[in-house]
Amino acid sequence: MKEALTSLIEKALQSLVADGTLSGGADVIPQLDHTKDPSHGDLATNLAMVLAKRAGMSPRALADKIVAALPENTLVAKTDIAGPGFINFFISQTTNTQAVSDILNAGVKYGCSDTGQGQKVQVEFVSANPTGPLHVGHGRGAAIGDALCRLLSATGWEVHAEFYYNDAGQQINNLARSVQARAKGLTPDDTSWPEDGYRGEYIVDLANAYLARESVHAADRDMTAGGDVNDLEAIQDFAVAWLRREQDADLKAFAVQFDEYFLESSLYDSGAVEQVVAQLNSNGRTYEEGGALWLRSTEFGDDKDRVMRKREGGYTYFVPDVAYHFNKWQRGFKRVVNEQGADHHSTITRVRAGLQGLDEGIPDGWPEYVLHQMVTVMRDGAEVKLSKRAGSYVTLRDLIDWAGRDATRFFLSARAATSQLTFDIDLALSQSNENPVYYIQYAHARICSVQRRALAANPHWRPADGLPHLSTLTEPEALALSLMLGRFPDTVSGAAKRLEPHDIANYLRELAASFHSFYNAYKMLDDNIEISLGRLALAEAARQVIANGLDLLGVSAPETM
RNA sequence: GCGCCCGUAGCUCAGCUGGAUAGAGUACCUGACUACGAAUCAGGCGGUCGCACGUUCGAAUCGUGCCGGGCGCGCCA
């Protein structure tokens, strides 16, 4: 509908250029906006104000000319020129209800588009260190990252979801020594407890599992604990596998899946890290100073050069990161989106600088990043900071246990990633009108309920039977709902383009409100069968869009609640 | 001190590339059920968009400078 009106306006502009009213070309793309106020029509454009100067007349006079030049059509019922020169379009009723038949025809595909044209995009998210259970920040990353995958997939991209495992380096060493200490019966209060050791309860479970020679099955391998308290390497291997299994279980409970788990250690095993260092060396991007090897990252916008290899040997963390991202590039991902916590912001410049220094023709804005800000958890009016299990932080599992999967996913993805998020457990738990996720799910359940009732009353009252009866939808609430439904495809493509899943959440809240308003004002099952069929068709279209929208967020659309 | 994010109604937040009287929800006040789910709806109250300049037909939105909060500024990851 929007496209159709846009092309009508473009034709009007062309004729104005042809008759000399407008100088220059008709190369302006008209901006059409949905109005906030119904008295301003359904769609409005500011075109006359933008072009007034070029036409040498007042915006309102030009608006008159544009309206007069519009080709004959059945789309627009009425136009109006208002305010400083807005042109308001009142869409005809049949066009308004067009969305309903579009939705019933497209079904689960409604809202999908092909802007990605099947190109590959990799989305990396969560990427937690295997040193403890996932925390609420990882949960936010999982909710947003998975929603991004679904959005990109819905807009025609071939999505590859990936989890990067930092299973090498100092923190893994700490983990092994912590487990070893617990296995020897030490506690964090003992003087011989390892410095920077992990203090959470889960380390005790881990140590006990190791001593009991348990077997674990993590994402891609099985292993059995050695049970030898002095074999630090065996402890490390087992601890990583055990925690991976733990994280996998959390992600599964959150309904998040990955296509691939990429291990940092594999970059050392394959020689990719050495290869990247050698290439940066031979490209002259490095120098030695103070016994360390430095990257000239200032050549690529960094505020200072960065150490790559420490004086006592060993690479700093971003070197394998560069190798990892070069590997992504070599795998053919011309587009990569990394979703991570904003506390890792400083690594972006370093990784990109390293990639630029390879001279492999990688674009300087590659990869793209979506950074989310911190999450704080509130309960009973106070901030929750500790989890018994993890010790120093609240876990994703805690949230799921307290609030349920749907509410947790919704709340963690319903706010702009750039804003700090307060997760109110009491709100997420309340099954009431103040809880947006229940409000939306309730609309879905309500529609399913009336459909069951309609079928019971008359076996022929199926949603598809309503299609020929859309002309009975004349009530303002029905037309408003229909117009709102028609905005879904724009909302999806906009959210995918901006990488902002919360657009979908906001839309769904509005859509549910529009539905409830319609539902409350009229009897769905009227004595007049024609009217009933029209309303049932509209309700089914609303149900379909709510289900599609919730699915983009990974939230279920229940038939009963 | 430097970099990034945020500052909009009592509270939680929308406001995309600058557009019409700044919007929702919640809280508070009024109304609507012998239920097609009241887990809902209708109406009301509530804001000098942190402050100040600037850019222009027009600024919550763009620019600069302040103020306030968060995060990051390691030869840790």
Image (tube, grey):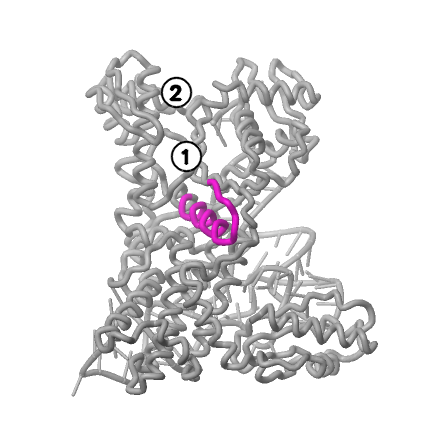
Q: Residue A296 occupies which quadrant of the picture?
A: top right
Residue A128, which numbered label?
1
Residue B75 percent across, percent down from the top left: 54, 22
Residue beneath disc 2: A173
Residue A264 percent across, percent down from the top left: 46, 26
Q: Are marks 1 and 2 in contact (CB under 8 Å)?
A: no
Location of the N terminus of chain A (image quadrant): bottom right
SS category of the residue bearing label 1: loop
Residue A153 falls inside the magenta stretch: yes
User: What residue is drawn where x is 31% and y is 18%?
Assistant: A235
Location of the C terminus of chain A (image quadrant): bottom left
Q: Taking the image as drawn, is residue A260 in sight?
A: yes
Query: Is A378 above or below relative to A211?
Result: below
Residue A75 percent across, percent down from the top left: 58, 78
User: What residue is drawn where x is 30% and y is 82%?
Assistant: A523
Q: Tell us which disc is closer to us: 1 or 2.
A: 1
Query: Is B43 above or below relative to A107?
Result: below
Of all chains, the one bearing label 1 is: A
User: What residue is drawn where x is 37% and y is 61%?
Assistant: A547
